[in-house]
Image (cartoon, rainbow, N blue to C red):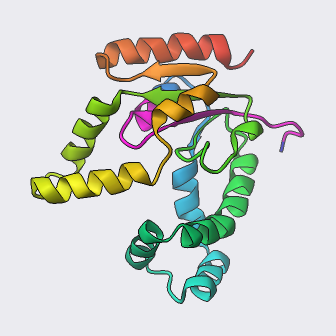
Amino acid sequence: MRKNWRPWAITGGIAEGKSTVLGYLHEAGYRTASADEIAREVFHRPDVLQQIEAAFGTSDRAELRRRLGADAGARRTLNALLHPPTWAALEASEVEVVEVPLLIEAVLFSHFEGVWVVTCGKDEQRRRLRERLPNEDAATQERTIVELLQAQIPTRAKIAFGDRIIHTNLPQADVRREVLVAAKQDFRS
């Protein structure tokens, strides 16, 4: 493990294109990781499952999701269990760029060399979220979208923490080109 490991972070709101941007970087040869994917792997470790069971009386993901949506204290408890081993796994990976959806909410930005905030604008974000919920009626869709958006800091507030803002409401070829130019300027310097 590098002594002063400090990757770049990619953050933004739900459905704003963070994974797409990370994918472009990965295709270009950058070492990348998703904090959410690593957290999912950490979640299934026997020692972590045991701690979750002790704290919540269950490790069933659907039940935990239901509780977390309604209880900020429960979210803090789960984060306290998952963040340290997730961070340790990220450090061990020595990646250059990490997608961290809740970077600002978890106050982790100081651990990174710099921060890219990915945004597509509120209207496009809501359109993308509706696409993710095709089997729900309009009222249920809207309720779900509101819940998802209220669980995070609005992207317009995250922009203040960004060293670079990547707009993903453009044609994908333009987004890809912007990402690759920005990466040459910001990474591996």
In front: 69, or 4? Answer: 69
The answer to which quarter of the image holds residue 189 is top right
Q: Position of residue 111 (x, y in %)?
A: 76, 40
Residue at (62% x, 84% y) in the render: 55
Residue 44 visible to the viewer? no
The image shows residue 168 at horizontal and vertical percentages of 37, 23
Give the magenta range: 2-23
Q: Is residue 158 above or below residue 140?
A: above
Q: Is residue 172 visible?
A: yes
The residue at the point 89 percent across, 40 percent down is 3
Magenta segment includes 45: no
> Across the whole image, how many numbered discs are drawn on residues?
0
Q: Position of residue 66 (x, y in %)?
A: 39, 73
| Residue pictured at 48% horizontal, 21% vertical | 166
In-image side of 55 versus 153 (left or right): right
Is residue 129 or residue 60 the one in the foreground? 129
Residue 159: image x %, image y %?
A: 54, 27
**Front one among 26 and 108:** 108
Q: Reply above or below: 19 against 135.
A: above
In this rendering, the answer to whether 43 lies above or below 55 is above
Question: Residue at the right extreme?
Answer: 3
Q: Quadrant of residue 137?
A: bottom left
169 with respect to 92 (left or right): left
Looking at the rendering, in which quadrant would you find the N terminus? top right
Q: At 24% across and 57% down in the image, what residue appears?
A: 143
